[in-house]
Image (cartoon, helix red, strand yellow):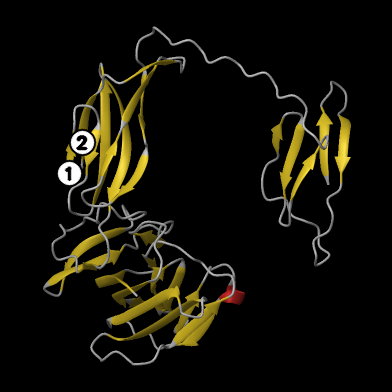
Amino acid sequence: KFFIIRPGQEKAEVLDEDEMPLAPDGSPEKFIGSPAISDGRVFLVTSEATYCIGKKHAGAAAPRLPPPAHSNGAVAHVQVVPTELILKPGESVQFRAGLFDDKGQFIREGGAAWSLEQLKGTIGEKGRYTAPNEALAGQVKATVGGVSGAARLRVIPPLPWSEDFDSRAPKSVPAHWINALGKWEVREMDGGKVLVKLANNPFTKRARTYFGPPDMANYTVEVDARAIEKRRQMGDAGVVAQRYALILFGNHQRMELQSWQPETKRTVMKDFQFKPETWYHLKLRVGKEADGKVHARGKAWAASEKEPPAWMIERVDPAPNLQGSPGLYADATFEVFFDNLKVTAN
């Protein structure tokens, strides 16, 4: 039911009460968003439909407030737009700087000095930025009279990608990765460098970290993974492609292909011997096939052995994830290690 209620000093008055119809399976329809109000009508979205409460035909539109006059006050805030971006190498974008006073009133646009923070590339006097030919992340800043505002951006090259972490500084993470800082670090190991999922914080021992645009599709992710065992406890390691995850579970000694971890009915499981202190190669391929369906296929094997020809675990998803960034998954009860990461188009 949906109620419109007028609060009062002593009690509330119910102005309107509407009962939503049942869903096709006989259950109540679920509200999945806040109501929206427009021209005297209320709009509701449920799991089954969109509803309107009010007159069938909208009345006259409410009068619009005139835009506020420009302020003559001092600059207290600089707003840089666009604010959050993903660019390709060599791509350019025009930034603008809006200036506001301490009451949030607009003063003017422009007149800012532009600079780059933790970011390569070029920025012109009028705010036009051109990305370099490498993966990175940082900020574009605009400054007026000692007041600064910034926009964040990442530069991500097209596939294929290959990362063995040997060129990375110890204790660092790739700057353009999302949800990585403080949870991972590059470390020297066995004469080279690897990526380590840290286990020094119980609140962040499990992490999904992404390193591509959210609209990617039809690609394969591969990586070498290794977990250690202490007190009969092992960590979990996996890869993510197009919102599907292929994970090796140390304590359960099994492999899972997940479309969404909390929804276990859609998870495919298979016994798998995940030995501690041993490098395994994980490979997950997701994409739309000739039949028009999205297929997710995975396999894992000891990195010292040859790749098995057949996929070990797979799923055809009737409610598929059509896009998603590649990533890594780890639940580091104790540290989990990754190396030789590759992402290629199918």
Residue on which the image places disc 1:
120
* Residue 30 visible in the picture: yes
Quadrant position of residue 116 = top left
Give whichever of 6, 11 is nearer the camera.
6
- Decide if residue 178 is on the left or right side of residue 321: left
Q: Give coordinates of residue 320: x percent, y percent.
A: 54, 70
- Decide if residue 165 is on the left or right side of residue 53: left
Q: Is residue 150 above or below residue 344?
A: above
Q: Identify the element where label 2 is drawn.
A: strand
* Residue 231 visible in the picture: no
Q: Identify the element where label 1 is drawn.
A: loop
Q: Are marks 2 and 1 in contact (CB under 8 Å)?
A: yes
Number of residues whose C-alpha sits closer than 10 Å to that of mark 2, classed few (under 14), some (14–19) or many (20 or more): some
Q: Give coordinates of residue 52: x percent, y percent.
A: 77, 42
Give whichever of 340, 48 is nearer the camera.
48
Residue 116 - label? 2
